[in-house]
Image: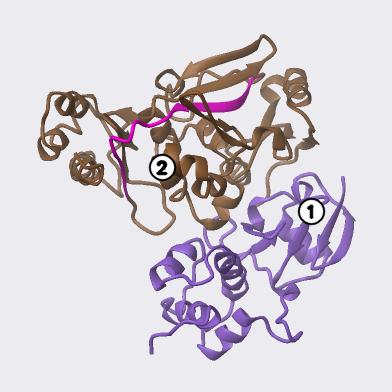
Chain colours: A brown, B purple
Amino acid sequence: MIPAAFTYRRVSSVDEALAAVAEHGDDAKLLAGGQSLLPLMKLRFAVPEVVVDIAPLDELRYVRAEGGEIVIGALTRHHDLHHDPVLAEHAPVLARVAASVGDQQIRHRGTIGGSLVHADPAADLPAAILALDGVLVARGPAGERRIRAAEFFQGPFETPLAAEELLTEVRVPVQDGTGWGFEKFTRRALDWAIVGVVVAGGAVSLINMGGTPLRASATEAALAAGASAAEAAALAAEGTSPADEAHATAEYRQHLARVLTERALVAAGR
Amino acid sequence: MKVSIEINGRTVTGEVEDRTLLVHFVRERAGLTATNVGCDTTSCGACTVLLDGESVKSCTVLAAQADGHAVTTLEGLRGEDGGLHPLQRAFREEHGLQCGFCTPGMIMAAVSLLEHNPKPTRHEVRDGLEGNLCRCTGYHNIVNAVMNASGQEVQR
């Protein structure tokens, strides 16, 4: 499988990338690690006329602690997150989730920004950023804007970013050490999650339980009221309407959400 | 566009379509056919090469993206004595292959795995090779081969 013909443009700065997408608008696609976009292009689900390669922009590849936040450049690769000492200390759940994305080869190329912008409801990192109350920083022709994770994931593969905007950075608060957990159920190695759960402090988010990553609000409320892990996890599927398909019925997914939430809460020490 | 990629220490230059995938450049322009096209969907890992020293699936990288970078394929591996690389030797000793189609990708992924984790557990080997599919061996001898190459005990 070979992508439909397109024009490849490599850029050497964020400004140059913004100029390229401003010129081509919806006809252009930004290429970061390419681990989501290139498979889609090979299947001809995505047929951009211009591909703007931002992978060389090392200025967007960093992790640093800044005040009470961890700031992550959009082109930081999953492999970098997995092995980053700052994350290991201040946001270990993110390092753990990044370590489970795809496989080794995919983690060497794929980027956190690419994963967030792709907004696949079955992807791991969007749910992690949602659980961490992350903020996504985008640059566009009108300058910079910040979007809360809760407003960023709008539907399957749908975000508020315009074609002319570029995600530059993700900011998450330093965790207060109240524990974290991550559970993911897949059919086979390297598959997408049938269901996954990310626990970070009192926050619980669900992977693949709807068109976007979701917060398990009933579980979070129960935890805040002092419920046990088992009691809180029993409420994990409340308000969810997961896909009902060949690999897993909606009912089975809701069962999994409860089971995995309890495991993740126990792992988090709740 | 014109791309120039250092493959196994030799610079290979060629005019390609912008959409050319790295795996096709390696096989057809560089004439190095150990790197296989298996599933072509980023799943099977038969096309795994090292790009700047890290394992990647070359069916999911554009040749244009590798322009100016260094690629290592199975043909570029050598042991310290100039003979087989320890992983190549171990795959032979442990019979870590049957039809051999997945083997180049397995070995390149294993090179990257041992680079980051020189003494992996059996579980870590399985985890590290999850991006590579083999339809023949049941993986047992492949895991043994990686354990052998890392100087650890294998399971008979």
How many other residues sit within 10 Å of disc 2, few (<14), some (14-19) or many (≥20)?
many
Residue B94 within the segment the image draws in magenta: no
Q: Amino acid at mark 2?
A: Pro
Residue closer to the observer: B54 or A237: B54
Q: Is residue A54 visible?
A: no
Q: Secondary structure at mark 2?
A: helix
Residue A180 within the segment the image draws in magenta: yes
Side of A163 where A119 appears, left or right: left
Q: Amino acid at mark 1?
A: His
Q: Is residue A157 visible?
A: yes
Residue behind mark 2: A92
Q: Secondary structure at mark 1?
A: loop
- Badge 1 and badge 2 in a common chain: no
Residue found at x 70% / y 20% = A25
Residue behind mark 1: B69
Q: Position of residue B144 (x, y in %)?
A: 46, 81
Q: Which residues are magenta?
A: A165-184
How many other residues sit within 10 Å of disc 1, few (<14), some (14-19) or many (≥20)?
some
Residue A121, located in which quarter of the rendered image?
Answer: top left
Q: Position of residue A202 (x, y in %)?
A: 26, 29
Residue found at x 46% / y 21% = A152
Name above or below for residue B39 compared with residue A109: below
Name above or below for residue A16 compared with residue B29: above
**Chain containing mark 1:** B
**Chain containing mark 2:** A
Residue found at the very far top of the displayed protein = A142
Q: Position of residue A118 (x, y in %)?
A: 52, 33
Residue A197, located in which quarter of the rendered image?
Answer: top left
Magenta stretch secondary structure, dominant: strand
Alpha carbon of mark 1 to alpha carbon of mark 2: how far? Answer: 32 Å
Side of B93 where A156 appears, left or right: left
